[in-house]
Structures are given as C-alpha cells and as structure tokens.
Image: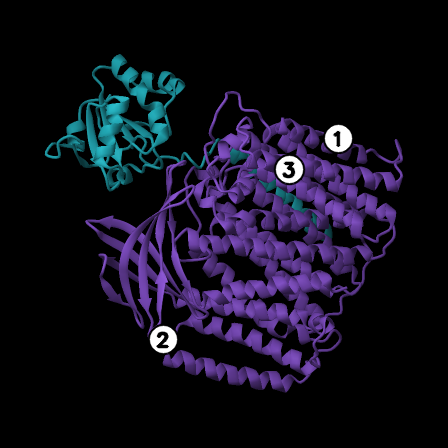
Amino acid sequence: MISLIGFFALCFSTIFSFTLLIPVSIFKINIKYFILIFRLSTFLVCISFISLIFAYVSSDFTNFNVFQNSHSDKPLIYKITGAWGNHEGSILLWICMISLYGFFYSLISKSANEFKILVLKFQSALFIIFALFIILTSNPFLVNSVFVEEGLGLNPILQDPALAIHPPMLYLGYVGFSLVFSLAIASLFRNNLDQDWINEARTWSMISWGFLTAGIALGSYWAYYELGWGGWWFWDPVENISLMPWIAGLALVHSLLMIRGEQAIEKWIVFLAILCFSLSILGTFLVRSGILTSVHSFASDASRGLFILLIFFLTTGFGFLIFLIKTPSKKDDLHLLLINKTSALIINNILMMITVFTILLGTIYPIIIEVLTNKRISVGGPYFNSTVLPILLPGFLLMSIAPVLSWKTNQIKKFRIYVICFLILSLIVSLQSYFTSFNTWGFIGLILGSWIIIASIISIMIRHRFSFTIKYITSINSFIAHIGVGVMIIGVTFSSIYQKEYNFNIEVGDKVSLENEILKFNDMQIIEEKNYQSLKANISIKKKNGNIIYIKPGKNYYPVSKMITTEAGIYHDWFKDIYITLGSENNNIWFIRVLINPLVSFIWLGVIIMVFSSAIAVIKK
Amino acid sequence: MKKIVLILPLILLTIICLFFLLFILLEKNPNEPPSALLYKDLPTFTSNNLYNKNINLGSNDLKEKYTLINFFASWCTPCRVEHHFFFEIKKENPDLFILGLAHKDDPNDSKKYLEEEGNPYSFVGLDQDGKIAFEFGVFGLPETFIVNSDGKIIFKHTGPLTKEIIKNEITKLF
C-alpha cells in the first residue's frame, strides 16, 4: 500500500513537471500557477521519498527494495538511512533534492519573473530526466513477488553514523550544482545583460560547495575509522570523482566572488557552472553504472549504466552546445597586471582546471586502456601524488597573499611585513626540520601551511579593526577560509609523512613499548549488540605523564549478512591519533597494528573551518 | 580559433562518452576481470586433503586428464546455489576429475557444509591461507576452472554456474 502511494506520488510529480515544460506559445501559464505547480511537484516527490522511508521504518517487506536492504533487527536510525543506502533509494533522494533546490530557489529568488520561470523550467527538465530514470530502470517501489517475513539486511559497513549522513550531504552538494547549472543556462537565454543571476549563483554554489565539502569529509572520516587502513584518503576512483566537482566548484566560487562585471569572467563562470554539474553527473554515472567498483558499488546493471550515460551525454552536451551558440560576444578587456587580483584569479582557475583534468585522466585512463587493449590496470596513489600535488603547490603559495592583492596595481600594502614574516618563518621551519628528520615534502607542507595561516592572520590584523560583530566575521571571511586550508595542509602533511607504524603479535597480558607510551593488552571481550556481535580487545596505553587511556579495537560480526567488519580503535588527541586495528588470531596470539598518526585532527579542524566559512559566505549579502 | 576552444569541451565529452559506451557494450564487467590464466598452463600447487591431512594432491597429479577445479567455502552463499550442478556434471561426465578447494575456510565448517549439501568432488583440498586461489587469480567465490589433458586452463567462470553456462559452454568442452 505504502509502496503504491510512493510510486503514484512520484508519477504525478513527474507529470506535473512535464506540464511546466509546455512552451508559452502553446499554453501560457500565469507565473503564480507556474510556481504553484512546481511546488506541488516538489511536495509530491517528497511524499514519495517519505513513503519509502516509512516502508523502511515499518519493515514492510512486501516492498522489494526494503526486503533487499533492510532487516527488522536493525536499529531505527539504520532503518531510516537504509532508504538511501541503496541504488534506487539514493537516486530517489537525488531527484527529491533537485526539486527541493528549485523549491527554495522559488521562495528566495528576487529575479524577474521571466528569468525565474526559465530557471525553474530547466530545473524541472533535469528533474524529469532523472525521474524517468527511476521509473524505467530503478524503481524503489517494486512489490516483492513472494511473501517473506524477513529482509536481507543492510551492508554492515554502511551501518555507521557518519555514513548515515554522508550520502545526503554529498548529494546536497552534487545536486546543488544542478540549480547553478540551470541558472547559468538560463542566463544564456535571457535578453538583457543584467547580472543579478551572478549573485544568486554565488549563494547557491556556495551552499553546494559547503555541503560537498562536508560530504566528502564525512566519507573520508568514515574510511579513516571503519576501513581500518589507517589513512583517510586513498585516491580511490570514487573519492576522485567527488573531488573533481569539488575543485571545479572551488574555481566557480572564487570566480563568482571576484567578478566585477567582466564579460570574459562571466562567460567563464557559465562554463564552470556547466562543468560542475557535468562532473557531478559523471560521478553518479561512474558509481551507479558499476564501471568503478569500490565500497560504493551496490548496483551494477548495464541498462542503468547506458541510461545514466545517456543522461550525462545529453545534459552536458546540451549545456556546452548552448554555451557554444549563445555565448555573449561582447568584448571587454581584463585588467591584467603581473600580480593583481584578476591575474591571481586566472592563475588560480588555470591551476584548478589542470588539477581537475589530471584527476579525470587518472580516473578514466584504466577504462580507456581496457577498451583498447583488454588489459586491466589501475591508477592509484603514486600517480595522483606525483601529478596533483606539484600542480597545487603554486596555487597554495598564491593563496597566502591573494586576498590582499589589489585590483588596479601591482602593489601589496605593507609588503615589507609579509617579507619579514616569511623569512622568519622559513628560518624557524628550516631549523625545525634540520633538528628533526628532514623530509622534502614535510618541509614544503609545513612551510606552506603555516605561511598561509600566518599571512592570513597578518592581513586580518593590518586591514581590519577587531570587533565582536557578525559584520567583522564576514569581512574577514576569505581569510578564515584560507586559514582552514592552511590548517588542513599541515594536518595532511604530518599525518601522511610522519606516520609511524608498529606491528605486534601479542597475547593477553603482554606489554610492549611504543616510542613514549607503554601498551598493554588487557583482555578480549565479546559484546552482543542488537544487530551484531562484537569482539573487542581491551588495550590500555600508559602515556609519558602517567595517564592511562583505553583503546578498544575490534571486529564486528553481522549475522544477517554474515560479514565481519574491522572496527579500528582510535584515541584522538589534538596532536596525534593512536590508531589500532585488530588482526587475526593464532593460538591466542593476536596480531595488532598500531599507527601513530600525528595531527590528523588538524584535517578535520581545517574542513570544519572551511565549511563554517562557506556558511558565513552564504549569509553575507 | 575561438570557436575551436568552445567546441573542444563537446569533442572531449563525445570521446569520453564513446569509451564509456564501448566499455558497457563490450560487457567489461569489473566483477569479471579478463583472466590472465586462460589458455595458459595450470599453476603449480599442492593441497592437503580435507579429510586426511596426510594425503596430498598437486598440479602434477592432474596431468593427462580433464579436471574441473571449483573454489568454494562454507561461508559463501552463492556456492550453495551452484553446488548441486556438480552432481549433474559428474553424472554426465563420469570420467571428469572434480577438484574442490575449500578457500579460506575452517576445515570443520567445510566438512559440515559437504555433509549438508553432499559431496560431488573427487577430491576436496584445503586452501586455508588462500595461496592456491592467489596462484589461480581467483577474484571472488565461487570460481570454476576447467583444465584439459595438456594441463592448459580452457575455461574460467567467476560466480555461481548456471544451467545455461553448463549447457552452452561447459558441455561442449568435453
């Protein structure tokens, strides 16, 4: 019954969206009714999604999707999140968001009516394409042909709080770019040359980028403690394809913030907007079609793959075609100097585009090679580390001073202070690396990260008088964002370069010493939880100052899906994480792996600062 | 010149999509990687018998006869699905040597599994540490290989066998 409601709500929502696309020449709808129909369609698709959630919550196994992905023993929270923990449900969430973005746009936008209608039309068109994809190939409301009493269960590694909100966050990011895409395409069709849409695009791309950042970070955090590999970024294809729209989105956000009426940059913004959404669909296509296998591939089906490929081709092709035909031809010159804001922006954008292209190449290269030569290769960390990092370096260097550059001249205010501070900093960092173990990348990372932070702080102090107001925070927002990046760079550098690994084979009661700590294996416990059995090692670590901390790495056994997951035990400290994974057992001797990851918390702190700053930028008008 | 720059994204898009299309149409399923071993010699291995650890079987023992090698485990649900087909294959080809290899499985569990499902294998070998599977490039269980009398691998299938596969691909090999 609930499946039926959900399915019909979805169908009617699609039909209503269709009526919005009727050309004005055939039937002219009043703007009031137009928006009403759009909102009705949004309402219906939300009903559809809610009924899917309801089917999950009530463990309605007459629904095939629920049967395949849920189990009545699951805790409520994972029943709810199970609704988007599978292919069909996640695409339903995706279109729900397309519609919701349009809905909020219709509420907030102050654009002229014609423009608003145009944007909502494009948004509806995107909605319809994806809705048809659901109805034709991935219907979450299929009814189970046989009667069953129990479901098959959700993949255990997905039963995790970070993962419960990771997909919605990521989708809010991906799908947000659909609205920016609609805005950009609509801007090519408008008759007058007013630039109101730039302001709207700025808000919406900022929102999307903030969500995307949070989504990627959550996924990364999850991988850090759930996969038990000790790292937080693996250059996994699925990570790469979420990174591409993120970087393109970063370029877009910067361009939108810096535009001062230049036609050339506006054109570039339209291009970036199309690119961002295309990369978002590309990501969805590659994951959903099962071309890239990873932890995300819960669906691989050739017909779905073809359908999404078609959507990707049509949407992106349409976008670029309109861009080709309708591109504004009026020329004006950019005010370029050796080093002013405009040139810095252009260098920044070029670097980001090269990065995106490099990642794209690394991601699809294995596919091209397999088609051509029938050989399977994989492109992993070494390629990306040695290509992407060098491209980013000049960008980071530029970033430290970019916000204080001038628009019209080559000069930087109080240039001398910056130079002096940079020299002092280099001296300190050089001494530091001379007395500890020297590592080129470690040196570069530390100097860049701390220079970005220090330069931003100097700029804030020179240019802004401190006060406790929101206005003050908004005025220094760009510096805050860059401080976040600096903090993250330091975290990334230290955690990847100065990571230490220890492997032990120990019995219960054994003590071993790490560099400053003494590790003791106290005992093994078996804990029964509602949906799994947990085997936990109780390990205590005595720190130098005498404090004792307990870390409990373990393994969970999920009887429903007969899977075992590794649960890393992590002790978080500001300056280092102690990360322990439990290996296999042999005659009561357990293999444990201990990683000392310095400054990992800085990565998450940096991300939080960036997301915070994007939220401030949205509020700022 | 300017137009070319604007057309470039479209061209790139088309090329990329073309490759994806080919990839899908050629059915390059990532779950079935091309086997480097097909039409190559059987890798060398030795395996202990599940029921008596003193009995070994090595790749040398498989010469001059057709052998079907099936990797299975008690924890592998799809293995149960295909299991009864081996009785049928055995019935139709009584001379065929069917080697079952219990992959990363507890011997007691494997024994229990074979009690429940029946034992169609001519020999059940242990591969507790997964080394033999590694030699064979096993990607996921179940996986089935057929070796001809020259010691060459002439068939490989990842995933459970089906009636169609047996009828269309396996039967004609003998």
Residues tagged 1 and 2 counted as in contact (Cβ below 8 A): no
Which of the labelled discs sits on residue A15, or is there none?
1
Which of the labelled discs sits on residue A437, or is there none?
2
Identify which amino acid the numbered label 2 is placed on: Ser
Q: Residue at x 41, y 34 (%)?
A: B32
Shown in purple, the chain is A
Q: Evaluate whether residue A411 shows in this view.
A: no
Give the mark toward the camera: 1 or 3. 3
Which of the labelled discs sits on residue A49, or is there none?
3
Give the mark toward the camera: 2 or 3. 3
Q: CA distance from mark 1 to mark 3?
A: 17 Å
Chain letter behind tag 2: A
Q: Residues within 10 Å of mark 3 (few under 14, many from 20)?
A: many
Name the side, left or right, on which A620 lies relative to A153. Answer: right
Q: CA distance from mark 1 to mark 2?
A: 66 Å
Farthest-out residue, top: B92
SS at mark 3?
helix
Dot 2 or dot 3, earlier in sequence: 3
Name the side, left or right, on which B102 lies relative to A492. Answer: left
Identify which amino acid the numbered label 3 is placed on: Phe
Shown in cyan, the chain is B
Quadrant in which the C terminus of chain A appears = bottom right
Q: Residues within 10 Å of mark 2 (few under 14, many from 20)?
A: few
Q: Quadrant of residue A432?
A: bottom left
Q: Quadrant of residue A570?
A: bottom left
How far across and down, in percent of the image, does residue A190 sit? 84, 48
